Image (cartoon, rainbow, N blue to C red):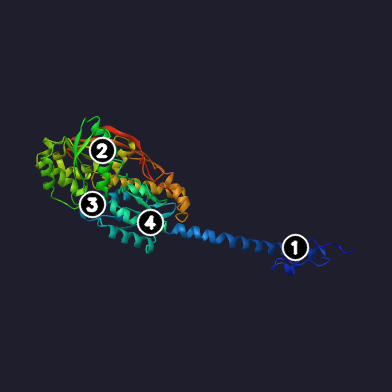
Amino acid sequence: MRPKSNHSRSGGGRHPETEHLTAPSVVPGTARAAFLTAFHRSFHRSFLTAFLAILLPAWHGSLARAAEPVKLGLVLPYSSVYATLGNDITKGLELALGEADNRVAGREFVVLKQDSQVNPKVGLQIATRFIRSDKVDFLIGPVASHVAMAMRKAAHDSKTFMIIPNAGADPLTREQCSPYIFRTSFSNWQPYYPMGSWMAGPEGLRRVSLLAPNYAAGKQALSAFKESFIPAGGQVVSEQYPDLKETDYQPYLSRLAQEDTQAVFVFFAGSSAVKFVLQYKQAGLDKRFPLYASGFLVESSVLQAQGEAALGIKTSMHWADTMDNPANRRFVESYRKKFGGEHPSIYAMQGYDTGKVLLQALRKTGGNTSDKAALRKALETAEIDSPRGPFRFSGSHNPIQNIYVLQVVKGGHLGVENRIIGTAAENLEDPGTGCKM
């Protein structure tokens, strides 16, 4: 009987590179050893080829991702009434990214900037170009609510993550929420709702007049104020809505002077805030009707220009540059060092937190921006030690945060500063009404 070969055939399934090495019926000692050596070498070579064929494409793709920058498309106002806001957000973002050497998980950040001009059509055009032509990984912006609403569909439909560092448009974290839209600032409801009950409660006010710019944020802000003020026993004497780019408030102030009101509550920001506070003082209304507002009216970027005209104004806000916690002290010190002694505004703080949230999420994904589900989860679970206090997102992607009551008093590097005098609401979460993802 012939002895069996050590390498038996298996039907027609011989490996193409080893088929010619089939063992003969009898293999003498030396020849047999040579045959086995050749067979093993060929088999290992074949196995390695197949293994690399599977591994190399994935490895190459990973290297390609690591080599490609993370592109951020900033859609912010660098001109017009909100230019200061856009510039401050950009500086805060640059500070956060700079603290990480402008890279994460081996990928460098590339920041593209375009001026939204506080114009919905312009904002949408820029967002569309960033998405389609520049292939950005994230949209950052905008500042104004009506611009944010115009950009929403472009971000959602393209599955491009949009991180909003200011615009508080309520629908974006309510009925028009999206898996791809996150906000690091506030909803328009958040700073205003608790101030209504504060003014009717601790402040003891019953008759209040209201003013805000005639656009989405202004109307949503005053609506939120009324939502708590009226049920608490308050009465709205009047509502006035100047044009967003209005600079002469005398007609509105003249009407206020004729009203039977106890106080005035307003929403203005940027250069509009400076003009309104100075004109309110010049009209002598500060001696008749105490002025209340959201903190945007007298935050640090406008307070120097307002000076002592802002003294006594009480506001509601989720941050003040005077907050005494380690994260805020580090932020203020680092910002002033980087930008030549300039003091950070609330917009700079929101830009800074935007950068911190991005960095943490991208570290969790290893820098991978292609896996949308993983990136979304990383953003949703982000928790940072913010200058405003502990930061996390609600289920509708809006910050959960305290709202403080501030008052402008003498002191600080500007001669006047915002000082916290109370807490209007703790861990306030926007209702997220109608949000389904």
Please give left or right for residue 169 compared with residue 285 in the image.
Answer: right
* Residue 82 circle label: 3
Q: Indicate which label's residue lies in the foreground, 1 or 4.
A: 4
Residue 202 in picture, x, y percent from top left? 24, 29
In x, y percent, where is residue 217? Answer: 27, 48
Q: Which residue is mark 2?
A: 316
Q: CA distance from mark 2 to mark 3?
A: 20 Å
Compare marks 4 and 3 and give the one earlier in the sequence.
Answer: 3
Residue of label 1: 36
Between 124 and 254, the one lying in front of the other is: 254
Who comes first in sequence, dot 3 or dot 1?
A: 1
Q: Amino acid at mark 3?
A: Tyr
| Amino acid found under the numbered disc labelled 2 | Ser
Q: Residues within 10 Å of mark 3 (few under 14, many from 20)?
A: many
Name the element at disc 4: helix
Q: Earlier in the sequence, mark 2 or mark 4?
A: 4
Q: Nearer the viewer, mark 3 or mark 1?
A: 3
Q: Tell me which amino acid carries mark 4.
A: Ala
- As drawn, the label of residue 155 is 4
